Amino acid sequence: MKKLISSIGLAALCATHLLAAEWGDPAKPLDIKEWVKGSAVNLADGKGKTIFNLYIMGNNLFDVAYFDHLSRLKYFLYSGSYTDPTHGIHNMGRNIAFKIEFPLNFDLNK
């Protein structure tokens, strides 16, 4: 292993009461905390040449259901009789991504 990188973060979306009331926005932004974790490892052979890089990224680790107060999808109604005030299409829940990079070294001078 040549290099190991790790990070953790917190995205805090704070509630506000400063909304444009003339538009009649019923969905007030909530106080939401979204945890993010990322790691990367660079694997090398004995000569120090990189074999591959592996990245792992996780967003919304505690799977908090929320919708962005600027999203137009928060107004989506499933039917006309559906009166739940938390209607709408929520943002994506827990999301984990993997990425592998293999270096391609072409020596054209051979």
Image: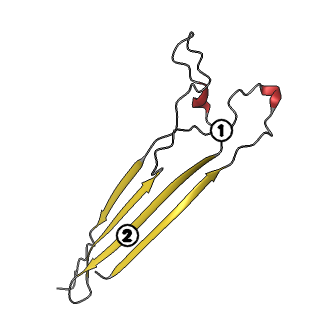
* Callout count: 2
Q: Please, what is the three-letter code of the amino acid marked with disc 1?
A: Leu
What is the distance, in whole Å, between disc 1 and disc 2 at their CAs?
Answer: 32 Å
**Secondary element type, mark 1:** loop
Q: Position of residue 110 (x, y in %)?
A: 16, 85
Q: Position of residue 36 (x, y in %)?
A: 49, 57
Q: Is residue 56 above or below residue 16?
A: below
Left or right: where does residue 45 sit relative to residue 34? left
**Secondary element type, mark 2:** strand
Q: Please, what is the three-letter code of the amino acid marked with disc 2?
A: Ala
**Disc with the residue nearer the chain's start (1 vs 2):** 2
**Residue located beneath label 2 in the image:** 40
Residue under the image location 61 percent in, 40 percent down: 68
Please tell me how crowded label 2 is: few (under 14), some (14-19), or many (20+) other residues with Cα within 10 Å: some
Q: Position of residue 7 (x, y in %)?
A: 47, 68
Residue under the image location 56 percent in, 58 percent down: 10
Q: Residue furthest right?
A: 22
Residue under the image location 68 percent in, 39 percent down: 29
**Residue located beneath label 1 in the image:** 70
Disc sitting over residue 12 in the figure: none
Q: Is residue 83 above or below residue 93?
A: above
Residue under the image location 56 percent in, 27 percent down: 88
The N terminus is located in which quarter? bottom left
Q: Position of residue 54 (x, y in %)?
A: 31, 67
Q: Which is nearer the eye, 53 or 30?
A: 30
